[in-house]
Amino acid sequence: MRPRAHIWLWSILAGLMMLLPGAVGAQSSATVPSIELSGTIDPATEKWIGSALSDAADDDAPLAILRLDTPGGLDTSMREIVQDIIEAPMPVAVYVSPDGARAASAGVFVTEAGDVAAMAPQTNIGSASPVSLTGADIDSVLGEKIENDAAAYARALASEHGRNGELAALTVTEAENLTATEALDERLIDVVAASEEELLAELDGFEVEGPKAQTLETAGLVIDEREMPLQYELLQLLVNPTVAYLLVLVGLVGIAIEVFSPGLFIPGTLGLVSFLLGAYGTAQLPVTAAGIALLVVGIGFIVAEAHLPTSGILGAVGVVALALSGLLLFDTGSDSFEVSVPVVITVAVLLGGFLVFATQKVVQAHRRPKLTGWEELIGATGDVRVPLDPVGQAFVGGALWRATLAADAADGDAERVRDRGARVRVESVEGLTLRVRPVQQHSEE
């Protein structure tokens, strides 16, 4: 009996050990992460989506949802996000939501990369035509190549998942834009759902086409909302082209002031911090050589204005160069992810003008004769505190000095400096004694 009892006991324990991991796995696999992807598609959202999908894979999620609402963004960041979606081990449903959201420009490619493409009823998708640095359409051989490449990319992503690849290409070549209902009727997307819960209900039994072909089983799955963390929101702020440029400009101005007037610390410290933050944001973005050159030339001309008698010509040219550098510094290829023209011009003019003024004042101060020690007291005025009879004390330059009447003082001056509070002017300094004479008092008419 005892051996048989031991066998039963070990069988029960082995069964419990097998059931326990299964229970844990079932619990984790019943959760569907709903990942926020809103705002511009940029290096910040790229890093966030990569991290979120990696976490979903670690949690053994059966499905991931990307809640998409974007005006577009950088082509490089879009392609990284598409690659993250393709490489995710679980199916990824890209859901354009909530009502009023859009999947514009780069958002089209992200949507078509999804194993499931879904939209809320009152949303739209399209307008994926590439644009130039100024936001205009590209009309050149290079522009045609870029457009053809983007169209082929959109067609491939849509066709691979059983959708209308030709219509996806038209969103690039003809800037086609469709509502959710139109996109569903034209097979550009798979599902229209009013909420994430409705989306999961619609996807129960859905046949995924493409590399992750399978039949989805979404009954009983629980949605776990995952918003963009603060660290990525701060990064998104830093990689904004307008913010990055302004931080660089403010940083350069602060550093320039510190160089010309060392010891102030605050302009230099704030300038260095601003420049480093701006440089980090700028390093995440595609920049142009012309923009960098204009920024350097602008600062150089403004500094030169303080040293050369050009009547403000170099300073004005420097300010214009700063404004132009802001407009040409970033080549984002997206009209939804570019610098704000009014902000850049206004701030460049204000900061450039301030830098011209500040450097001129600093240089003028450096060119003045340096006065040190007792030389600073010559010509200064003060009050008699102890009557000069013949030696007393006078308060001059914030200090109390031994004072006596100047040797060549006029007759009668001796009487005038014997009264406390009499005003005197320093004529010379001998050791620690001031030679003074009374300040002439003019009677009022």
Image (tube, rainbow, N blue to C red):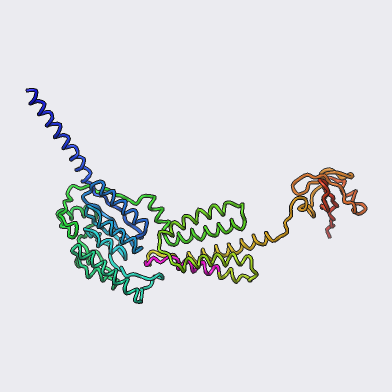
Question: Residue 158 placed where, x, y %?
Answer: 22, 65
The residue lying at 40 percent from left, 61 percent from top is 285
Whether residue 275 sits left or right of residue 407 in the image: it is left
How many discs mark residues in the rendered view? 0
The residue lying at 48 percent from left, 60 percent from top is 246
Whether residue 323 sits left or right of residue 237 in the image: it is right
> Which residue is situated farthest in the bottom direction here?
140
Which image quadrant: the C terminus? bottom right
> Which residue is situated farthest in the right direction here?
411
> Which residue is situated farthest in the top direction here?
2
The residue lying at 87 percent from left, 51 percent from top is 406
Prevailing secondary structure of the magenta residues: helix
Question: Residue 124 placed where, x, y %?
Answer: 28, 64
Q: Quadrant of residue 195?
A: bottom left
> Which residue is situated farthest in the front direction here?
3
Q: Quadrant of residue 442?
A: bottom right
Which image quadrant: the N terminus? top left
Taking depth in this image into account, of 201 and 114 the one nearest to the observer is 114
The span shown in magenta is 318-334
Magenta region includes residue 159: no
Question: Residue 326 placed where, x, y %?
Answer: 47, 66
Residue 386 higher or lower than 125, as above or below: above
Question: Residue 128 placed where, x, y %?
Answer: 30, 68
